[in-house]
Amino acid sequence: MAKLYHVPLSPFCRKVRLSLAEKKIECELVEERYWEKDADFLRRNPAAKVPVLKIDNKIMAESSAICEYLEEIHPEPPLMPRSAENRYEVRRLVGWFDDKFHNEVTSKLLYERVNKKVMGKGYPDSQNVKAGAKAIKYHLDYMAWLLDHRRWLAGDSMTLADFAAAAHLSSLDYISDVDWNRSATVKDWYAKIKSRPAFRSILVDQVPGFPPPPHYADLDF
């Protein structure tokens, strides 16, 4: 069985978990306090980051590289389109959420509100929280624009781009930092994607000291 070293609210770990579950690859989850830089974990990934996946007698790091590896060895159900142009669009949006959205929103809200406390690094920086709360509005509007023109974020089929976005938003939804009333289109998209069986284990995640809001696991909000 595969083994994933992860942190429950990490969007990068959640993206890999969603890919594994969608492809019905059984996986043992092992929580890893990566910030403590345990020697055994550093041997698995000298970058001291999660996720790290042990599969097929290989140790793999970096979430997007892991997800594309899974796509190649387990092509069904597909999470990447067939055409080069459409695959580019998926990769562009995965990069958008894992880079731009992460830097402007996730790191300013989730990391300030949760990670600092868990890691013992002090209190949230109110300026960062304010900046993240402002930036997420722009990103939700961009998602709404995409979904007004497409069935899913990258096109007519659900892809890794949807999982990347849902991984970030689900982590933020755990701490009630997503205004689902801003866009009915985005809310409907999220309700559709979090109703998938692949989302089940994510919706039962619990972080000590941070109980999720009642709507978090409600498939109908």
Image (cartoon, helix red, strand yellow):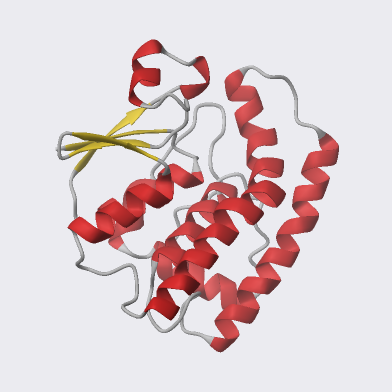
Quadrant where the N terminus is found in the figure: top left
Q: How many numbered circles does the render carry?
A: 0
Tell me where residue 54 appears, x and y as whole percent: 24, 34
Question: Residue at image x 40%, y 37%?
Answer: 51
Q: Residue furthest bottom?
A: 149
Would you say residue 215 is visible in this rendering? no
Tell me where residue 183 appears, x and y as whole percent: 66, 74
**Position of residue 113 measured from the top left corner of the image (x, y, whole percent):** 68, 35
Judge whether 59 appears above or below 215 on screen: above
Please state if 177 lies on the left or on the right of 191 as rendered.
Answer: right
Residue 87 visible in the displayed image: yes
Q: For this rendering, which residue is in front, 216 or 153?
A: 153
Residue 104 versus residue 127 in the image, above or below = below
Residue 167, given in percent of the width and then of the height, sits at 48, 53
Q: Nearer the viewer, residue 220 or 107?
A: 107
Taking 169 as reference, is 137 left or right? right
User: Which residue is drawn at the image coordinates 41% and 46% (left, top)?
Assistant: 63
Looking at this rendering, what residue extends furthest in the top direction? 39
The residue at 62%/32% (across/down) is 114
Give the image quarter of residue 71.
bottom left
- Quick check: 134 above or below 154? above
Residue drawn at x 31%, y 78% is 82
* Image quarter of residue 38: top left
**Please, which residue is most extreme toward the right here?**
127
Q: Nearer the viewer, residue 25 or 73?
A: 73
202 relative position to 178: left or right: left
